Amino acid sequence: MFIDLWNSLKSIIGRDMTATMVDTPPPELITTIEWGMMDKSKFFPLYSLSGFTVRCALYPLTLIKTQIQVQRKRDAYKGVYDAISKIYANEGVSGLYRGFWMSNFQIISGVFYITTYEGVRHELGKHEINPRLKSFIAGGCASLVGQTVIVPFDVLSQHLMVLGLVKGSAENTRNPKLNPLGLDLEQPMSRVALAKEVAARVYRLHGVLGYYRGYTASLAAYVPNSALWWALYTAYQDELFKISPSWVSHLFLQCVAGTLGGFTTTILTNPLDIVRARLQVEGVGTMKQVFKELWREEGFVGLYAKGLSARLVQSACFSFSIILGYESIKRVSLSDEYRTRVRW
C-alpha cells in the first residue's frame, strides 16, 4: 500500500514539474541594452577610453577626409592613397596626426552625446513609439547637444589639419585660401604654440563668434547624419537578427549593422559635410554661397563625390569600431540580473 501511495505521489509531482516547465518559457533574450540596465560607474570611464582608442587609430582618416574636402578640385591630392603618400613623405607620421590633441576634446562632447542619446531613448521608451523612430529622434537630439559642445574645438582642429595642405602642395599656387588665418608657417613652433596661435588668430579676426563659425552648417550636416545613422543602425540590426542563424554572434551583427548604417548616411549627407568643412576653415559666406561656389568649381558630381571615398572609408572604420566598443562596454556594464539574457 505504501509503495502504491509513493508511486502515485511521484507521478503527481512529475506531472506538476512537467506542467511548470511547459508553462514557464525561458526568459527572452535582450537584443537592445537599455540605459536603466547598466552600471553607469563602469559605463562612462570605459566609453571614454574606447572613444580615445578609436580616435587614436582612425584620426589620419579624419585628417585626410578634411584636407580633400577643403582643397580646390584636385590641386593637392588625387585621392586617399595619394594624400597619405604625400603627407607621410613631407611630414612623416606626425603629419597624419596634425591637430590630434585639439580634436580629442571631442571625447568630452562624446560623453554629452551618448548621455543625451540614451536619456532621450529612455524617456521615449515610456511611450508607444516605434524603436526606429525612437533612435532617429534620440540621435538628432544627441548631435544637437554634442555639436554645441564641440564646434569651437572642431574649428581650431580643422584649421590645424589644413595647414598640412599648404606644405603638401607648396608648388601649386591655385590654393590661396588654404592658410586663411595668415600664419607664418616658416617660423618654427611647437604643436602647443601653434594651437595657441590658431586660437588667438581666430579670436583676433572674428571675435568669440569665430569659434562657432560653421555652427549652423555643422548642425545641418551632423544632426540629420546622426539621426539617420541611429535609425538605420536599429533597422539594419532588426533585419539581420531576423535572417541570421541563432548561433551567429549578436555583437558581430550589430557591428555589421553599424557599418551599413554608416555607409548609407555618408552617401546621403556628403555634400552637407563638404559645406560644413569649407565654412569652418575659410569662415567666409553662408551655406548657400558655399554651395554655389562648390557647384561652380566642381559641378554636381564634384560637389556630391568630393572626398566621398575618404569619408566612406572613415565612416566604415569608425562605425564598426564605435559599435564594437559601445556594445561591448554596454555588456560589460550590465547589472547582474540581465547578464544571462544578453548574448555576445
Image: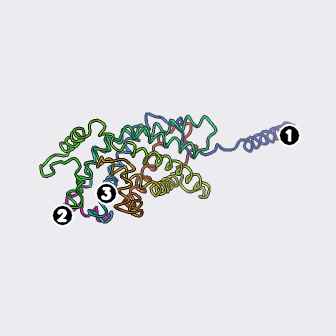
Residue 210, disc: none
Q: Magenta span covers which residues?
A: 80-95
Q: Main secondary structure of the magenta part?
A: helix
Q: Position of residue 7 (x, y in %)?
A: 82, 41
List the single residue furthest toward the right: 1
| Residue that numbered label 2 is attached to | 171
Residue 64, disc: 3
Say which amino acid is labelled 1.
Asp
Relative horizontal placement of residue 328, taking residue 164 as reference (left or right): right
What residue is rendered at 46% in x and 49% in y?
225
Say which amino acid is labelled 3.
Ile
Q: In terms of secondary structure, where does tag 3 sit?
A: helix
Tell me, yes or no, if residue 57 can be seen here.
Answer: no
Query: Along the polypeptide, which appears first: circle 2 or circle 3?
Result: 3
The front one of 292 and 342 is 292
The verdict on residue 234 being magenta is no
Q: CA distance from mark 2 to mark 1?
A: 103 Å
What residue is rendered at 48% in x and 47% in y?
224
The front one of 27 and 180 is 180
Residue 4, disc: 1
